Amino acid sequence: MNLKYKFHPHLTDWNNIESLIRENIDENLIIELNEDINLSSRSKNFKKTLQTHTKSVVFISKSLKIEELVIVPTKQEAIDVIQIEEIERLLD
């Protein structure tokens, strides 16, 4: 399986993250969050933005926990999640 994804390191602004997701709606994304990201700056439409995305969006953080997001501690684990989700999409 030829796994394709875009990696975006050290993002700190939720508006930029939302734009990135909207602009890459048909791409698997790995987004590394800075530990000092302001969680309260997420827009009310963020969950809707994620739901309209057709591929996987996986976040990397060692300490953040946000219920509606897929967050893993390492880039390798993010790649593994994308691979599993790609296989699931193939089986559907």
Image: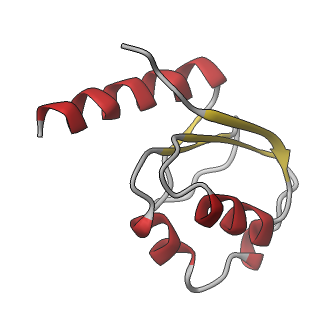
Residue, x 46% and y 21% (percent of image)?
3
Q: Is residue 2 above or below residue 33?
A: above
Residue, x 23% and y 38% (percent of image)?
89
Q: Residue 10 location, x and y as percent?
A: 85, 42
Who is closer to the viewer here, 19 or 76? 19
Q: Quadrant of residue 20?
A: bottom right
Who is closer to the viewer here, 5 or 9? 5
Q: Quadrant of residue 66?
A: bottom right
Q: Quadrant of the C terminus?
A: top left
Q: Quadrant of the N terminus?
A: top left
Number of marks drawn:
0
From this viewpoint, which residue is outermost toward the left?
A: 92
Q: Residue 59 location, x and y as percent?
A: 61, 44
Q: Is residue 22 above or below residue 2?
A: below
Residue, x 67% and y 49% (percent of image)?
64
Q: Is residue 61 left or right of 72 when viewed as pictured?
A: right
